[in-house]
């Protein structure tokens, strides 16, 4: 479930990671011991799912992405390379290479929220508070820093610290590679949304219902691993089994259902509303309006946005638009 969440939120959590310290860890021995744990093999030719939305003078290609990948993981197809060469510009969820007009000052809002917030541990039951400390410390994060974060922000960020020898990195993720291609050819890159505003929507959801749901989940957690907190059915997969989602994505498989996790309580509803439903609705409107501007672009956003009942594809259909699957 933590990795499922990362398919949606990793592009956003980078806003917090630079300012949120992790506890010092000596992972050298563990890296050596698990040298083959994350080995993968690709005995197939990549063909990630692609869609096309177009009218008489505008073509928008759409690619579902994985934000962080291990070095050497192949995902480019001849068809995708042809599209990349063809389009006039690139649109991502967020990018450092373009300013989003009207972007909020997230740093100021974040600082104000944290400074005026009662630490999470003081709002939990005594048993829940003890489990909360255990969870944060097991994640390798700094307890005081994460205890002061709004709950949803802490839960998003917690999974992205040092995790042994896992070689996934945004350096090899789809967006970073695409940015390099478009910068090299002097073509424009833009953001489809104000990522700061998305994160602020989560910062604001820090009420008693969120705390109560967190407390219940902490009390149900057996305390053995961070992964089991996010997913009670977690299995310690290795090798290609660990990379099953990445392999499915690279093969172009798209699931009918997408569950961001955390059940149907306050936390699950908040993540689904703010990270999926609301964003996909806004993006569908953006695409509808973008059809009024002639040209050809590539939209590359997290693959989870193309799956499930509130997917971007579903939101386009609600507006009377159909994106054609082209591979």
Image: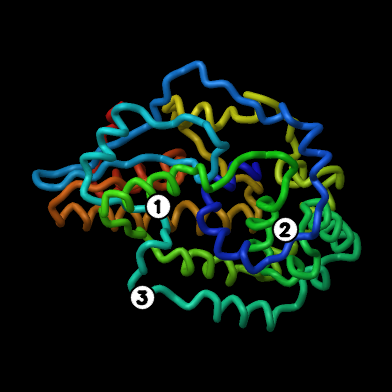
Query: What is the quadrant of the N terminus in the image?
Result: top right
- Write the residue at 21% across / 40% down: 86
User: Which corner quadrant of the image does residue 202 belong to?
Assistant: bottom right
Considering depth in this image, is 7 or 187 the residue closer to the camera?
A: 187
Residue in the image at 68% along x and 51% along y: 159
Mark 2 or mark 1, which is nearer the start of the sequence? 2
Which quarter of the figure is the C terminus placed in? top left
Q: Where is residue 277 in the image (x, y as percent from the top left)?
A: 45, 53
Task: Determine which of the numbered discs, if any, sits on residue 280 in the image.
Answer: 1
> Label 3, label 1: how many angstroms apart (C-alpha)?
20 Å
Residue 127: give x, y in percent of width and height: 90, 60
Residue drawn where x is 35% and y is 58% of the image: 192
Tag 3 residue = 102
Residue 282's x, y, as percent? 36, 58
Kindly indicate whether the residue at mark 1 contacts the one at mark 3 (C-beta within 8 angstroms): no
Q: Is the residue under label 2 in contact with that under label 1 (CB below 8 Å)?
A: no
- Of labels 2 and 3, the one closer to you: 3
Q: Would residue 323 be found to the left or right of residue 107 on screen?
A: left
Instruction: Name the side, left or right, on which 23 lies relative to 60.
Output: right
- Disc 1 from disc 2: Cα separation: 25 Å
Give the mark nearer the N terminus: 2 vs 3. Answer: 3
Location of mark 2 (residue): 213
Tally of numbered discs: 3
């Amino acid at each position: 479930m933590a990795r499922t969440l990362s398919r949606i939120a990793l592009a956003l959590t980078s806003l917090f990671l630079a300012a949120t310290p992790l506890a010092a860890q000596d992972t050298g021995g563990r890296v050596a011991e698990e040298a083959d744990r994350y080995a993968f093999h690709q005995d197939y030719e990549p063909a990630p799912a692609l869609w096309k939305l177009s009218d008489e003078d505008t073509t928008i290609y759409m690619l579902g992405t994985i934000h962080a990948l291990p070095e050497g993981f192949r995902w480019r197809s001849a068809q995708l390379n042809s599209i990349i060469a063809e389009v006039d510009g690139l649109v991502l969820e967020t990018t450092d290479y373009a300013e989003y007009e009207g972007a909020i000052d997230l740093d100021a809002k974040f600082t104000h929220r944290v400074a005026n917030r009662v630490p999470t541990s003081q709002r939990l039951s005594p048993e829940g508070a003890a489990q909360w400390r255990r969870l944060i410390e097991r994640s390798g994060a700094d307890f005081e820093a994460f205890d002061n974060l709004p709950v949803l922000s802490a839960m998003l960020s917690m999974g992205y610290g040092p995790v042994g020898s896992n070689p996934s990195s945004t350096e090899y993720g789809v967006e970073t590679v695409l940015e390099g291609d478009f910068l090299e050819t002097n073509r424009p890159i833009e953001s489809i949304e104000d990522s700061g505003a998305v994160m602020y929507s989560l910062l604001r959801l820090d009420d008693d219902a969120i705390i109560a749901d967190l407390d219940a989940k902490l009390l149900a957690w057996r305390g053995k691993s961070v992964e089991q907190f996010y997913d009670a059915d977690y299995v310690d997969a290795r090798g290609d089994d660990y990379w099953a989602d990445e392999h499915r994505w690279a093969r172009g498989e798209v699931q009918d259902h997408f569950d961001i996790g955390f059940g149907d309580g306050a936390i699950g509803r908040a993540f689904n509303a703010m990270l999926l439903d609301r964003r996909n609705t806004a993006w569908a409107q953006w695409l509808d309006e973008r059809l009024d501007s002639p040209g050809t672009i590539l939209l590359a956003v997290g693959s989870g946005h193309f799956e499930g009942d509130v997917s971007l594809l579903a939101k386009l259909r609600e507006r009377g638009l159909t994106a054609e699957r082209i591979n």
